[in-house]
Image (tube, rainbow, N blue to C red):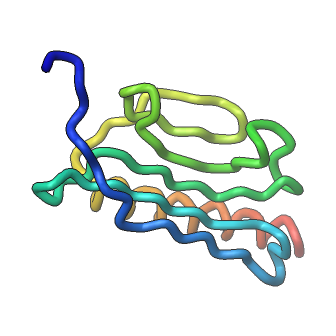
Amino acid sequence: MLGRKSPSTKILDEEIVLGRPRRGAKLSEEVWEDKDGTVVKYNLAYINPIVCRVDNGRVLGYDNNHDQHHRHFMGAVESADFKGYEPLLQRFRAELKELWRKENEGDS
């Protein structure tokens, strides 16, 4: 069966609505695995329509839709190096921490 993708199972579907100082912003994480436990699809996003008015408010995100790993940042999309889901999740969290630090500096 050429061209047919193996079945996957959604193992994580979390959305966290943030409070102050980012009231109304969201963090989203979706992960699908194949029968062997390998992550085959993912979507990570920090959504804040006050900070980003394009790309449905997605300030920062990573996903592998359209069969390619890519990074979203403030409406721009670029190819992303993928060495596994856990390293990518750590990268997302580090970038998010730096973004929030900069956002907080802007509030002072």
The vertical placement of 37 against 6, above or below, is below
Spot occupied by residue 9 in the image (x, y as percentages of width and height): 31, 56
- Name the quadrant containing residue 68: top left
Left or right: where 15 falls relative to 24: left
Q: Position of residue 69 (x, y in %)?
A: 39, 34
| Percent of width and height locating residue 82 | 29, 41
User: Viewer-proximal residue, 51 or 47?
Assistant: 47
Residue 70 location in percent, x, y? 46, 34
- Quadrant, the N terminus: top left
- Looking at the image, which residue is at 41% across and 50% down? 42
Q: Residue at x 70, y 66 (%)?
A: 26
Q: Residue 63 vs residue 45: left or right?
A: left
Q: Residue at x 16, y 59 (%)?
A: 37
Question: Which quadrant is the C terminus positioned in?
Answer: bottom right
Q: Specify whether 72 is left or right of 5.
A: right
Residue 42's place in the image compared with 5, above or below, is below
Q: Residue shown at 63%/41% (left/top)?
A: 73
Which residue lies most toward the front here?
1
Is 1 or 105 nearer to us in this picture? 1
